Amino acid sequence: VQLQASGGGSVQPGGSLRLSCAASGFTSDHYAIGWFRQAPGKEREGVSCISVSDGSTYYADSVKGRFTISRDKAKNTVYLQINILKPEDTAVYYCASKNEPRCRTWYSLNWYNYWGQGTPVTVSS
């Protein structure tokens, strides 16, 4: 399994970004993809998770209403749309996968089987 995160960049406050996580190596759609972020000097935190098979979504309270996770099963890609970006969203964003169809303990780093490399997001005026 390989995960390729992309789409990060430098944006001004109030802007938007769409991050992508391209997955390969799965033999079915019975897996979950989570997005995490790690700000400088802080621990990595979970922001969202999606069940690829049925599209169920989960969000951290801190990002509800501004972040939207979605998936394109045909492209084996999961997206994280981030709107109304704030300076505190500055972080390296990672995607991770779990070989289970449900986002059970999706907020736990240790729950995941595979991790992609991070894509950096910088929000600054």
Image (spheres, helix red, strand yellow):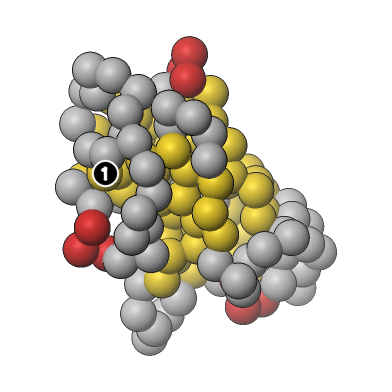
The residue at 23%/38% (across/down) is 99
In the figure, is residue 83 to the left or right of 73?
right
Q: Residue furthest top?
A: 74
Q: Is residue 57 visible?
A: yes
Residue type, numbered disc 1:
Lys
Instruction: State the image coordinates of residue 98 (x, y, percent, origin top left).
Output: 26, 44
Image quadrant in which you'd find residue 18: top right
Q: Is there any visible trace of residue 7 in the rendered image?
A: no
How far across and how far down the image is residue 71, in percent?
Answer: 53, 31
Helix, strand or loop at mark 1? strand
**How many numbered discs?**
1
As drawn, is 113 to the left or to the right of 43? left
Give the class, few, some or many, for how many residues have Cα within 10 Å of label 1's Cα (few <14, many ≥20): many
Q: Residue furthest bottom?
A: 41
The residue carrying mark 1 is 98
Relative to residue 55, is residue 94 drawn left or right? left
Of the pair 79 and 51, the residue shown nearer to us:
51
Q: Quadrant of the N terminus?
A: top left
**Does 70 sit above or below residue 85?**
above
The answer to which of 20 and 119 lies nearer the viewer is: 20
Residue 47: percent from the left, percent from the top? 50, 62
